[in-house]
Image (tube, rainbow, N blue to C red):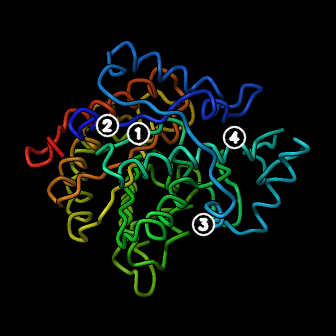
Amino acid sequence: MSVQASSVLLVAGERIARYGFGDGHPFGPDRHAAFLAEFSKRGLDRRVRVLETRAATREELQSFHTSRYLDFVAERSRTGEGYLDAGDTPAWRGVYEAAADVVGATLLAADEIMAGRSRRGFVPIAGLHHAARDGAAGFCVFNDCGVAAEMLRRKHGLKRIAYVDIDAHHGDGMYYGFEDDPDLIFADIHEDGRYLYPGTGRADEVGSGAAAGSKLNIPMAPGADDAAFEAVWPRVLAHVRKFEPEFILLQAGADSVEGDPITHMRFTPAAHQRAAHDLALLADELGHGRVLGTGGGGYNRINLAQAWTGVVQGLVGAGVPAAHKHN
């Protein structure tokens, strides 16, 4: 199959669908089915390649997370008791394996892109951006984007990775996990932390030490709409372009769409489609075309279905440059 025919990859299926929390928790396991229904309705299942996940190995997880933290999650996963953080992220039997499957999905998509079998990718149940190197947070057990950034460098020899986040919540696990890393280019549009968890992501948080200036945080007022997005989005593109990354990760959380039950932003799914499309064109401009989107947050099922299918449409719609059509 040519790169043209398989230019976009979706990693989905029951193994990542099971990552979620029951008893009415906002991050329920039904989110995957809500996305797939809209994905199929729009005929996207006929336009992309679909793979099932694999489990991330302990060694891969340790590229980002501490060994002590992995042991803690494994223990709670066996008993299914208690929380993995201060009270947002409940433990349940098998949570370690389910979270490792999410990381494995993101790693599989990254590997397929690096191998040239697909040019872009999307993983709906992924983008768990709150998980820190040494702990869970905000419904996030393992940080798949953090692991992917580390493994793209260790396994594939890349140097500069860009991480772009349009989830309503600040990607604190990624920011603080790479705060002093000048080669992790970070750009995050989010609801102002004075009004929303996790309370971080001030505009003056730009990275530390040698990484100062490599990080861009854009806090938005509650109620920020598509016009507000359009006003700041060029800053994100300019920031990413300046550093010429070799791979772009997009965390496309749908909780920034109007009507989410736990946030206050008012984007429409058009913002998510534009973000994916523009980043794909930027990646082509940089000569490699590599963009991997993850679903992130989003707790209104209609919103996430529309926003995530918009991301896939944005990636598909960006096409493949003529020079790459017959690779």
Q: Are marks 3 and 4 in contact (CB under 8 Å)?
A: no
- Residue 137 appears at what percent x and percent y? 67, 53
Q: Is residue 95 above or below residue 183?
A: above
Secondary element at image label 2: strand
Disc 3 residue crowd, few under 14, some 14–19, many 20+, Cα 10 Å = many
For image coordinates 8% across by 44% down, the residue present is 322
First reached walking from the N terminus: tag 1 or tag 2: 2
First reached walking from the N terminus: tag 3 or tag 4: 3
Distance from disc 1 to disc 4, alpha carbons, whole Å, reads 18 Å
User: What numbered label is drawn on residue 122?
Assistant: 1
User: What numbered label is drawn on residue 8?
Assistant: 2
First reached walking from the N terminus: tag 2 or tag 3: 2
First reached walking from the N terminus: tag 3 or tag 1: 3
Q: Are marks 2 and 3 in contact (CB under 8 Å)?
A: no
Which amino acid lies under the numbered mark 4 shown in the image of this protein?
Ala
Q: Which residue is mark 4?
A: 98
User: What numbered label is drawn on residue 64?
Assistant: 3
Q: Are marks 1 and 2 in contact (CB under 8 Å)?
A: yes
Disc 4 residue crowd, few under 14, some 14–19, many 20+, Cα 10 Å = many
- Residue 311 appears at what percent x and percent y? 33, 35
Distance from disc 3 to disc 1, alpha carbons, whole Å, reads 21 Å
Q: Nearer the viewer, residue 10 or 117?
A: 117
Which amino acid lies under the numbered mark 3 shown in the image of this protein?
Phe
Q: How many dots with numbers?
A: 4
Distance from disc 2 to disc 4, alpha carbons, whole Å, reads 24 Å
Distance from disc 1 to disc 2, alpha carbons, whole Å, reads 8 Å
Which amino acid lies under the numbered mark 1 shown in the image of this protein?
Phe
